[in-house]
Image (tube, rainbow, N blue to C red):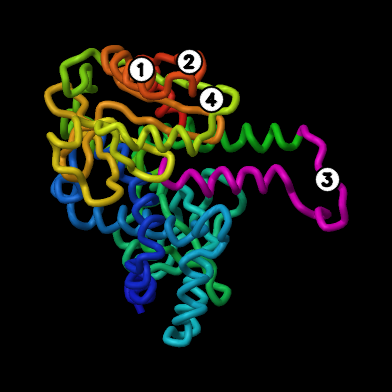
Amino acid sequence: MSKSHELAGLIKWSNRDEWQDLFDDVFDEHFGPAFEDYGIDFEQLEKLIGEREMTNLWGCAFEDFVTRPASEEDERTIVDDYLKRRGWKESPSARRYMEALRDSLFSVYEVSEIVPGQSMLLRDMIRGGEPVRVTEHSATRGLRDLDRLGCRVVEVAGKHRLAGGLTTFSEAAYAEVVKAISDPMKRIGEEVSKQEVPTEDDMAGIDFPELAETIFLHGSAPAFTAIWLEDMLNGRIDKVPPPRFNSDGEELSFHTISYPLTPGATADAIARRLEQIPELLAQEEGLWNWTEPAESVSVPAGPSDKYARVQDERLHIELEDGTPVFATVELTPDMLVLSANSKQRADRAKLMLKSVLKGQIGQPHTEVHSPEELAAAQEDDR
């Protein structure tokens, strides 16, 4: 049975509403940076890299998705959920494969001793250790000794096998993997090894440096995709020039203005005042988008997410129906935070809030960041 057939039920299960947000978030982590940098979408990416590579990348992202817990409070993965509710429909080998995939890590392996159509040796270039003999039919026919294969290796019924998402890294891309993933992971392990660790009986035998490296690598799966895509797309298509202005043509500068609530003021009272401002549309509890006055726009029926797009060096922030968003206002129990992407918008929004919330908010603290500073911070986060 092929890998895709083994996961057919699990893939269908991922379309359930309860898993869609996590699915979308993980796929955005894998593909979002390239889409943003190059101004493309899934269809355009497939035309650039081909259907086969697109299928492999989709597999890399999906396999990362199946390893993720539902939330910080809910440690269930989609594999746990699916096998509990539909596992009876799957063969024992398919169930074992899903469980192994759930616990797997993406890494880069050096290929050697290929037996076409049968097997090959893989040596983990990130974590080290002895090479393992992997049973594999189709992939062995297109690989060469010393290729660097990005994939997940799982053990099922005593045999090592590949998962479905495969990428081959060039020398340049692998060098970037070492710089962006392997070296930082090893530094984390070295730092943990210098620290004192708990000595309780239930902690005995745990290799804390190895555990720290494993956690780091588990969260690095999207970085492998980003590195591979950058290597593939660089030179094939021009990157989208970074925006210099907002949709009004004002020079971009990102203002975050934090107002403490005055003594006696309550978030509920402030929320009621904010709800009376026609320019503010509620996105969710405690969060408003500043738009044109409500009578001049088509007000969405209920909460609406924001989307960003760049056109002619202008950054457009819009609601789902195209309504432009000029700033956001967020309310917490002890703070009101205004965010705007130009000095002009920040000044206008400050006047609006001051007139409505006089006596309810104190002196603001303002932080201003340039687009270059934010871009550097985002690159560090990746």
Mark with earlier residue (3, 1): 3
Say what amino acid the circle numbered 1 marks.
Lys
Separation (CA) of disc 2 from disc 4: 10 Å
Mark 1 vs 2: CB contact within 8 A: yes
Picture coordinates of residue 61, whole percent (x, y): 37, 54
Mark with earlier residue (4, 3): 3
Label drawn at residue 364: 2
Picture coordinates of residue 98, whole percent (x, y): 47, 71
- In the image, which residues are magenta? 194-223
| Residue picked out by circle 4 | 261
Mark 3 vs 1: CB contact within 8 A: no
Image quarter in which the N terminus is found? bottom left
Say what amino acid the circle numbered 2 marks.
Pro
| Residue picked out by circle 3 | 198
Q: Is residue 183 magenta?
A: no
Picture coordinates of residue 89, whole percent (x, y): 42, 86
Mark with earlier residue (1, 4): 4
In-front residue for pair 133/257: 257
- Label 1 crowding class (10 Å Cα cut-off): few <14, some 14-19, many 20+? some
Secondary structure at badge 1 equals helix
Separation (CA) of disc 4 from disc 3: 42 Å
**Side (left or right) of 322 relative to 105:** left
* Labels 2, 4: front one: 4
Secondary structure at badge 4 equals loop
Secondary structure at badge 2 equals loop
